[in-house]
Image (cartoon, helix red, strand yellow):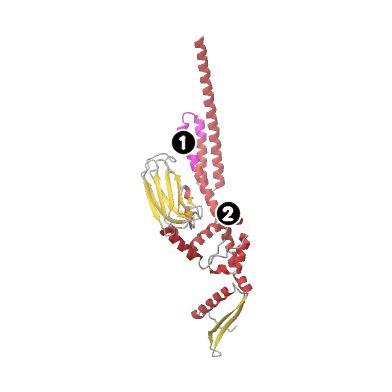
Amino acid sequence: ESGIDLSNDKTAMTRIREGAEKAKIELSSTVTTEINLPFIAYDKATNSSKNLTIQLTRAKLEEIVRPIVERCRASMVQALGDAKLKPDQIDKIILIGGPTRMPIVHQFVTDVMGKEPERGVDPMEAVAIGAAIQGAIIAGDISRDIVLLDVTPLTLGVEVLGGLREPLIERNTTIPVKKSKIFTTAADYQTAVTIHIVQGERPMAADNVSLGMFNLDGIPPAPRGVPQIEVTFDIDSNGILHVSAKDLATGKEQKIAITATTKLSKEEIDKLKKESEQFAEQDRKKKEEAETRNEADNLIYTAEKLVKQDLKDKITSEQTERVNKAVTVLKDALNDKDVANIKSKMQELKNVLGEISTQVYQAAGRAAGTDQESSADQGTQGQQ
C-alpha cells in the first residue's frame, strides 16, 4: 500500500515474523487481533517513519494454514496403517508442539480420529518431559513402572539376489529389538557372502540408504541353497544397530555396529517416505521383474539338476532333450525385460517338468507292481 519493499530489510522482516508469531498465538484464544509494528520503515518521499497496523482474524489465519494442516491427514492415515489400528482403537491422542494449540488443529484431529485430543498435556513441554523420562530410564533413576517407547523411523533390511531389499526390522518397530532371518548362497560352491545393510521403504536395495556392508567368508563349499547363514539385526536402547552374520555349519561369524540409523534428520526421513509413495508403481514393476527373474533362475537350476543328477538314470534321451530345450528358451527370455514372456516360458518349462515327473512316477509304479507279481509267483511255486 505504501510502495515500500521490506523484503531486503532483515531487521524489519524479523519484526514482522515476531509479530505474526504473536498474532498466531493470540488467535488460539481470541477471534481477532491486531498486528501493530511502529516505525517499521522510513519513507524518504515524505521524510517520515511508517507504522504497520493490520487487523487479523482467526478465520483468515485458518484459511491461510488449512492446506498445511490438511497435509497431516496422509501421515496420520499412514501411521494407523503401519500400526494396523483403526481410529476407534486409539485410547488417547496427545498433541505436541506449540502450533497444536490452534483450534483448527484440534478440530482437524477430532474429525480424522473421531475423538478429541487430550488437553491435560502441555504441547510445549511434552517433548522435553519425554526426553527427561527416557534419560532417567536409561540411567536407572526411575523406580516407578514407567515405559517410554521409541520406534524405528524406517525399515531396515539387507540386499538379496536380484538387488531386492529383504526387510528384517519394519519401520515403527519398538526398540530395543532383535530380529534374525536365515539366508543361503545364490551359487554353487560359494565360499563367501556380502551383507549389505540398507534403510528405507523401497523394494529395491539401490533405491534406499546404504548403511554399510561386510563379508562373511570361510563358508564350506556346497550346492546353492544348502549353506545356512543367520543374519541378525539388534538395535539397542541408544538406537545403535548391531548386525551379525553367522554360518550355522561352522559357527564362523562377522559383526558390524552402525550408528547412522539415528543420524537422519526428520526432513531426510520424510523425503525417503515421500519417494516411496511417489515411485510406488515404478517400484512395483521393478520388484515384480526382479522376483520373476529370481524365480526363473531357480527353476532353471532345478531343471538342470533333475536331468543331470536326480533323474539322470530314470528318463529317456527324448525327455532330457525336451527339458533342455525348454530351459534354453527360458534363458533366452531372461535376456530381455519382458516379464510376461519370462512368466510364459517359465510355465512351459514347469509343464514339461510336470509331465516328465508324472511319467517317471508312473513307470516306477509299474516296475514296483511287476516286482510284486514276480515275488508272488515265486512264493506260489515254492509252496507247490
Q: Residues within 10 Å of mark 1 (few under 14, many from 20)?
A: few
Percent coordinates x, y for residue 257 in the rendering = 39, 54
Instruction: Report if residue 152 is visible in the image.
Output: no
Percent coordinates x, y for residue 367 in the rendering = 52, 23
Q: Which is nearer the eye, 80 or 163?
A: 80
In this view, which residue lies farthest toward the front?
A: 143
| Residue 176 is inside the magenta segment | no
Task: Tell me the number on the disc at residue 305.
Answer: 1
In this view, which residue lies farthest toward the bottom?
A: 47
Q: Quadrant of the N terminus?
A: bottom right
Q: Is residue 374 above or below residue 79?
A: above
Percent coordinates x, y for residue 205 in the rendering = 47, 53
Q: Which is nearer the eye, 20 or 87?
A: 87
Q: Residues within 10 Å of mark 2 (few under 14, many from 20)?
A: few
Residue located at (48% from left, 48% from top): 162
Residue located at (59% from left, 61% from top): 73
Q: Amino acid at mark 1?
A: Lys
Which residues lie in the magenta part?
A: 297-322
Residue at mark 2: 85
Of the numbered discs 1 and 2, the one sitting upstream in the chain is 2
Q: Is residue 88 above or below residue 354?
A: below
Task: Tell me the number on the disc at residue 265.
Answer: none
Q: Is residue 43 above or below residue 308?
A: below
Quadrant for residue 59, please give it.
bottom right
| Residue 299 is inside the magenta segment | yes
Q: Which is nearer the eye, 72 or 133?
A: 133
Determine the secondary structure under disc 1: helix
Percent coordinates x, y for residue 157 in the rendering = 46, 52
